[in-house]
Amino acid sequence: MGSFKGHALPGSFFLVAGIWWTGKHSLWHATRRNKNIGSTRLASRASQRRLEIIESSVVLFFSLVGMLLEQFAAGGPRLQLYDFAEKHWEYLMNWQHATMYLFFGLAATVNLIVHTTEVAPLALDRLMLAIAFFNEGFLFFYHLHGRSMLDVHVHQLLLFAIFGEAVVAFLEVFHRGNIILELLRCTLTLLQGSWFWQIGYVLYPPHGPEWDLNDHNNMMFVTMCYSWHLAFAMLVVSVLYCTVSCGVRSRLRRTPPMEMGLLKPRDPESEDEIL
Amino acid sequence: MGSFKGHALPGSFFLVAGIWWTGKHSLWHATRRNKNIGSTRLASRASQRRLEIIESSVVLFFSLVGMLLEQFAAGGPRLQLYDFAEKHWEYLMNWQHATMYLFFGLAATVNLIVHTTEVAPLALDRLMLAIAFFNEGFLFFYHLHGRSMLDVHVHQLLLFAIFGEAVVAFLEVFHRGNIILELLRCTLTLLQGSWFWQIGYVLYPPHGPEWDLNDHNNMMFVTMCYSWHLAFAMLVVSVLYCTVSCGVRSRLRRTPPMEMGLLKPRDPESEDEIL
Amino acid sequence: MGSFKGHALPGSFFLVAGIWWTGKHSLWHATRRNKNIGSTRLASRASQRRLEIIESSVVLFFSLVGMLLEQFAAGGPRLQLYDFAEKHWEYLMNWQHATMYLFFGLAATVNLIVHTTEVAPLALDRLMLAIAFFNEGFLFFYHLHGRSMLDVHVHQLLLFAIFGEAVVAFLEVFHRGNIILELLRCTLTLLQGSWFWQIGYVLYPPHGPEWDLNDHNNMMFVTMCYSWHLAFAMLVVSVLYCTVSCGVRSRLRRTPPMEMGLLKPRDPESEDEIL
Amino acid sequence: MGSFKGHALPGSFFLVAGIWWTGKHSLWHATRRNKNIGSTRLASRASQRRLEIIESSVVLFFSLVGMLLEQFAAGGPRLQLYDFAEKHWEYLMNWQHATMYLFFGLAATVNLIVHTTEVAPLALDRLMLAIAFFNEGFLFFYHLHGRSMLDVHVHQLLLFAIFGEAVVAFLEVFHRGNIILELLRCTLTLLQGSWFWQIGYVLYPPHGPEWDLNDHNNMMFVTMCYSWHLAFAMLVVSVLYCTVSCGVRSRLRRTPPMEMGLLKPRDPESEDEIL
């Protein structure tokens, strides 16, 4: 039922999301730390809000496209869930994937509401993210019945990243703006993304021979490979973080904050750590 | 031993409790946020306390009724636990259900004491709620021996909601008044309620054919269905929350707080976040 | 290898410990709450310290006695661990029990050091308590190999209380003086104590017929029985807590704090919530 | 594949690390507590930083040496991962060990960056430590397939120490400078170190007879033995802590802080609890 593309596509999305989040949180963290030398020019509260709205809209758009594709692309269930004639469920995989997209779409919708209106509490965006990841992991967890050993194993390893990310997002409800947690979440997103690609290569190798799905040595290699993906994700996040941090600082040094006096009225930006 | 009604009844109770709690916490949160424009007229500390007392009394009443019905309704054990003649336990199911009600009754009693006297610490109500839910999940957990696959699975899914709710209530001991946790608890209560109904429909379909309890596809559908129930519960909670929030704000805007000066002496209401 | 007495004895110890702790923490909590009306006469910081020292000494004494009895009582290993002649381990059960006592003895020793000198951080007593309970649960956990179903089950239920208590004591490292956690710990201690008695009655009934250790109905009854023990423990703790609270208050009311001025120099007592 | 030396070597490293950390954290804690009597002479912020840099460099050096040895020592894979001729993975054990060293090397690198530059947040060092330990435990966890009972058991016990340490290091991200957590981490490091030695003695006894790896009594003894290692580790940590504490105090008492006035400009040392 799966395919190489079916794993590469979500993998790419998570890779992009991980890089995007790393950049965003690094920039805002650098902004907060250098507030005294006028860094709020680079990321004012209004621009932060605009960024969040754009991000949520994009996620919402792709969730909707994903749901529609799962339903109406060639071989989809076209909203039919049960075949009453032959008494069996139709295309449960497609429905499950659509359900995963649905929860990411809900998280994006709530994010939009949180950042455009005043009605919802701010921390709700992290809770919805945690629930979306938890739901993804939950559906994957009950996905694995009756598959071969290596297939189960690579998906179990994926669950570490997914549930880890759900837990980190839930912790962010209480420790919002903690850069450690934010970078950890970015790392786990990248890990998830690159591991989706790895699953594609292991289960549906696009060229080269098939893997023996019941060889214990393959399983041990794959476990180690997961550690390497984690190291790689940590490397990418730290390089990005350092680049953004240094970029912010050098740019601030080049253009001294002469308009210091003018910044006073924008002071509400100092609220950005408040829940 | 179970029946459709036996699942629909607790389901309805949890649905009502979820909706009630959502309304209550939304109202109080809106009240706290709009304190500066005189919202304490809508939910003063005294009225909050009265509400808690009414809620606890109702829960206590239904727990007692539930215990009495489990014991004395047709086919109940009538307080007899062991049949010494035939050497077997009598009606263990009824006793287990009565035990669950007992713990909710205890939680309600403690709630009453906490909110009518000064003797007990405030956070005790959440701890008792956590223990009541934990006990419910604990008894369900050891309930499932020797049942068919789908029967076990739907009850296991129920345990996610129950134990999740116990954990959230326990976290509220330390983060009292955190609207995120309160809404999460409401969502899980609604999820539990609607899932009880779903279990009734799956195991004892009131009309239509029986489900095949050993079909793996049914299990996968039911898992996905659980996600939908969660999404539905989140939807209900957010609609309720927004309605109450907007209602409070519009009502405050219509009747400006002219009696501002008169509010001063009611100031002790500002203590409602304090443990 | 076990016996009724072998379970009743630790059970009694935990029951006494639970009641003692409930009284102690209730008294101190009442003292802290009524500080403004001079309650520090009832439990000054110096008397608190004296109480802790007495408690630790008693625990240390009984741990030493327990270790000596396990080693040198009739049928004990007398410090011999390995029989080199017949190549097998000697009296592993006795050694395991002595190890459990050792950890409670260590916790008491650290408690003594913490409360007599200034050298160790205050929160260390709770950490050592958590480790002692964790070690107890750890040894019980690997104790159960190859026993009959009900035997394993009653010990597993015991583990809930033991590990729960370890977690609560660990949380107290960070939330010292939180009355909710303290009462929860007392409840779990009482639960552990009464459950030890219950295990004795189930596995080694002193009079009456043997239990069928492989009957599933017995297992279900025992599970429910555990809930009743929990309810009973909660009842005992709340009755004790209320009695102490009311006693403190009524006594304070009878003897008004005329010596208010004299209390000033004793002010360091206000530090008792500080870590 | 394993050997006595292969377990004694990492064991020795962890023992040294545990002792070193205990000394370091005890010294700094004593310094912070006695700040008012001029203890900052003993461990100024600059000297703390220097110590961290030396520690990180040493860890980094040994990680590199370890990786090189695993790869190029006699019987190593020499960077060859897959034997395309015979279609099997080469020396997976060596690669796994090298991966473990890699993560400790990464943690040391980040530690160096954190303590030499200002670019990274301070708490990152604990997060990296947590990830390094988690990764070690993760690789060990999937290491145990198809071994004999006692072999699996002694490694599972090791996992308690490893994952426990990962959790404690993660908690330190939020509670930095909490001496309780620091000493607990030191204890678990020592436990890990001495347990590595024990594993070596059990699985590859250097002299004396082989152990029966399928005897349940051996398993029970080993479990108890683990408790003794924990007690021993706690003893070592507490003796070290007390020695350092008393040493600092007696030395401060001998040399009264006459240069009090001169200390003022070094005041930034007071920041050492800040994240």
Image (cartoon, coloured by chain):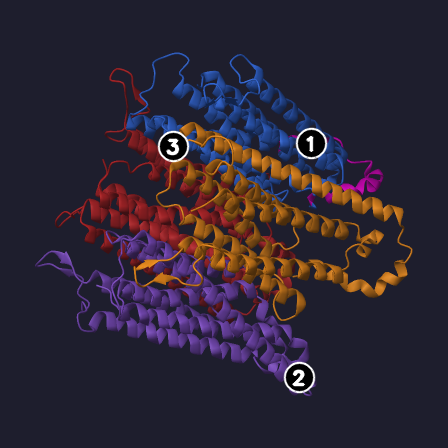
Chain colours: A purple, B red, C blue, D orange
* Residue extending farthest front: D74
- Front of the two marks 3 and 2: 3
Q: Give the residue at x 47% y 61%.
A: A169
Q: Amino acid at mark 2?
A: Arg
Residue A178 versus residue D6: which sits nearer the camera? Answer: D6
Q: CA distance from mark 2 to mark 1?
A: 59 Å
Query: Which numbered tag is attached to residue C68?
Result: none
- Circle 1: residue type: Glu
Decide which of A181, A239 is in the foreground and name it: A239
Report x, y in % for residue D24. 70, 51
For disc 2, the marked residue is: A253
Residue most extreme to the right:
D258
- Is residue A104 within the magenta segment? no
- Distance of label 3 from label 1 (alpha carbons): 46 Å
Q: Which residue is mark 3?
A: D214
Q: Label 1, on which residue?
A: C52
The spot of residue D71 in percent (x, y) is 47, 59
Q: Is C266 within the magenta? A: yes
Q: Nearer the viewer, residue A161 or D225?
A: D225
What span is colored magenta in the figure? C244-273
**From the viewer's perspective, is the residue at label 3 or at label 1 nearer?**
3
The furthest residue to the left: A85
- Tell me which chain the residue with mark 2 is part of: A
Q: On the picture, is A235 further left or further right than B67? A: right
Q: Quadrant of residue C262?
A: top right
Q: Is residue D180 left or right of residue C206?
A: right
